[in-house]
Amino acid sequence: MLTQRRRDILRAVVDQYVSSVTPVGSKVLIERYGFTVSPATIRGDLHALEEDCLLRRPHTSAGRLPTDGGYRRVVDDFLAHPDLLGAGPLYPDESLAGKLGMSVLTSGARGNSSTFPFPTAYTPSGNLDELLRRTSAALSAYANCLAIAVAPTPLSARVTRLCYTGLAELFAQPEFSEPQRYFRLMRVLDDETELNDLLMDSFCEGEVTVRIGHEMLDAGLDALSIVLCPYRTNTDTRRGVVAVVGPTRMDYRRAIPAVTTAAWTLSEILR
């Protein structure tokens, strides 16, 4: 059982490592995150988190990095307490939809006449494809990751139509400086069956789902994480998925509400 301070320290290490891509030490935590205990106490907490396999040291003299387990503990806190995402208890919300460029028209429920930057109606071969393209483009730009938007399909069917954008953003991340790190992902994106398996095997019905590193169940993808969320049409018999894929060092604080908001927005449009 983690103490509250150690939970806060773990979250601070994750936040700092996401932004800096460098090991995090006690000095940085005290100077930037307002911990009022001594450096020795912080070092003791970091050691305890390392003993719990939530942090690791790349070498003896370095600060700490999150492990897959450390990311998982922080993400579970985010999912259980959305206020930690800065989104409040009822995320997603329209302010984030606006940042994503996806204002939502809700048939007067909110008393405004906002218009979509997407088509407000769609056909199987036309506007839906444009809607998916714009959604994935907005997500990849906002989350700085690869984004995937899957067209609604019958619940028992395999993925047949999708759009993805953001490979350049993903491969610009320092984790992908070695080409072999992304060969497996490229093969998955080129293979409809494997891509369907990646999305559906990661999917939990009716909620945002996060798979981190080794949870991807594919040794070639264990440097990646995926955040995905379903959306539905007005019949509730067809389901689509939106997702972002990034390194395990993904900014989950940003990605989780972004994916949830995109799914919510698509559901509103298609209904």
Image (cartoon, rainbow, N blue to C red):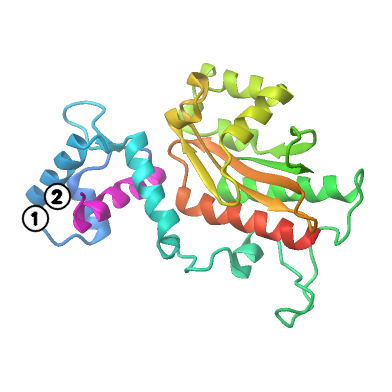
Residue 180 relative to residue 106: left or right? left
Image coordinates for residue 243, horizontal then vertical, percent: 62, 43
Residue that carries the numbered disc 2 in the rendered image: 42
Name the magenta segment's main secondary structure. helix
Amino acid tagged 2: Ile
Dot 2 falls on a residue whose secondary structure is helix
Dot 1 falls on a residue whose secondary structure is loop
Amino acid tagged 1: Ser
Up/down of 132 relative to 218, above or below: below
- Let me know if residue 117 appears in the view: no
Residue 212 forms part of the magenta stretch? no
Q: Residue at x 63, y 69 (%)?
A: 94
Q: Of residues 179 and 113, which is closer to you in this image?
A: 113
Question: Tags 1 and 2 in contact by the CB under 8 Å rule?
Answer: yes
Residue 18 relative to residue 271: left or right? left
The numbered disc on residue 38 is 1
Q: Residue at x 39, y 49 (%)?
A: 76
Image coordinates for residue 12, horizontal then vertical, percent: 30, 52
Number of callouts in the render? 2
Residue extent of the magenta highlight: 1-20
Q: Quadrant of residue 183?
A: top right
Q: Residues within 10 Å of mark 2 (few under 14, many from 20)?
A: many
Residue 26 relative to residue 252: left or right? left
Q: Residue at x 74, y 63 (%)?
A: 268
Up/down of 116 relative to 10, above or below: below
Q: Residue at x 26, y 37 (%)?
A: 55
Q: Of residues 106 and 174, which is closer to you in this image?
A: 106
Residue 244 relative to residue 49: left or right? right
Alpha carbons under labels 1 and 2: distance apart: 6 Å
**Quadrant (top left/top right/bottom left/bottom right) for the C terminus:** bottom right
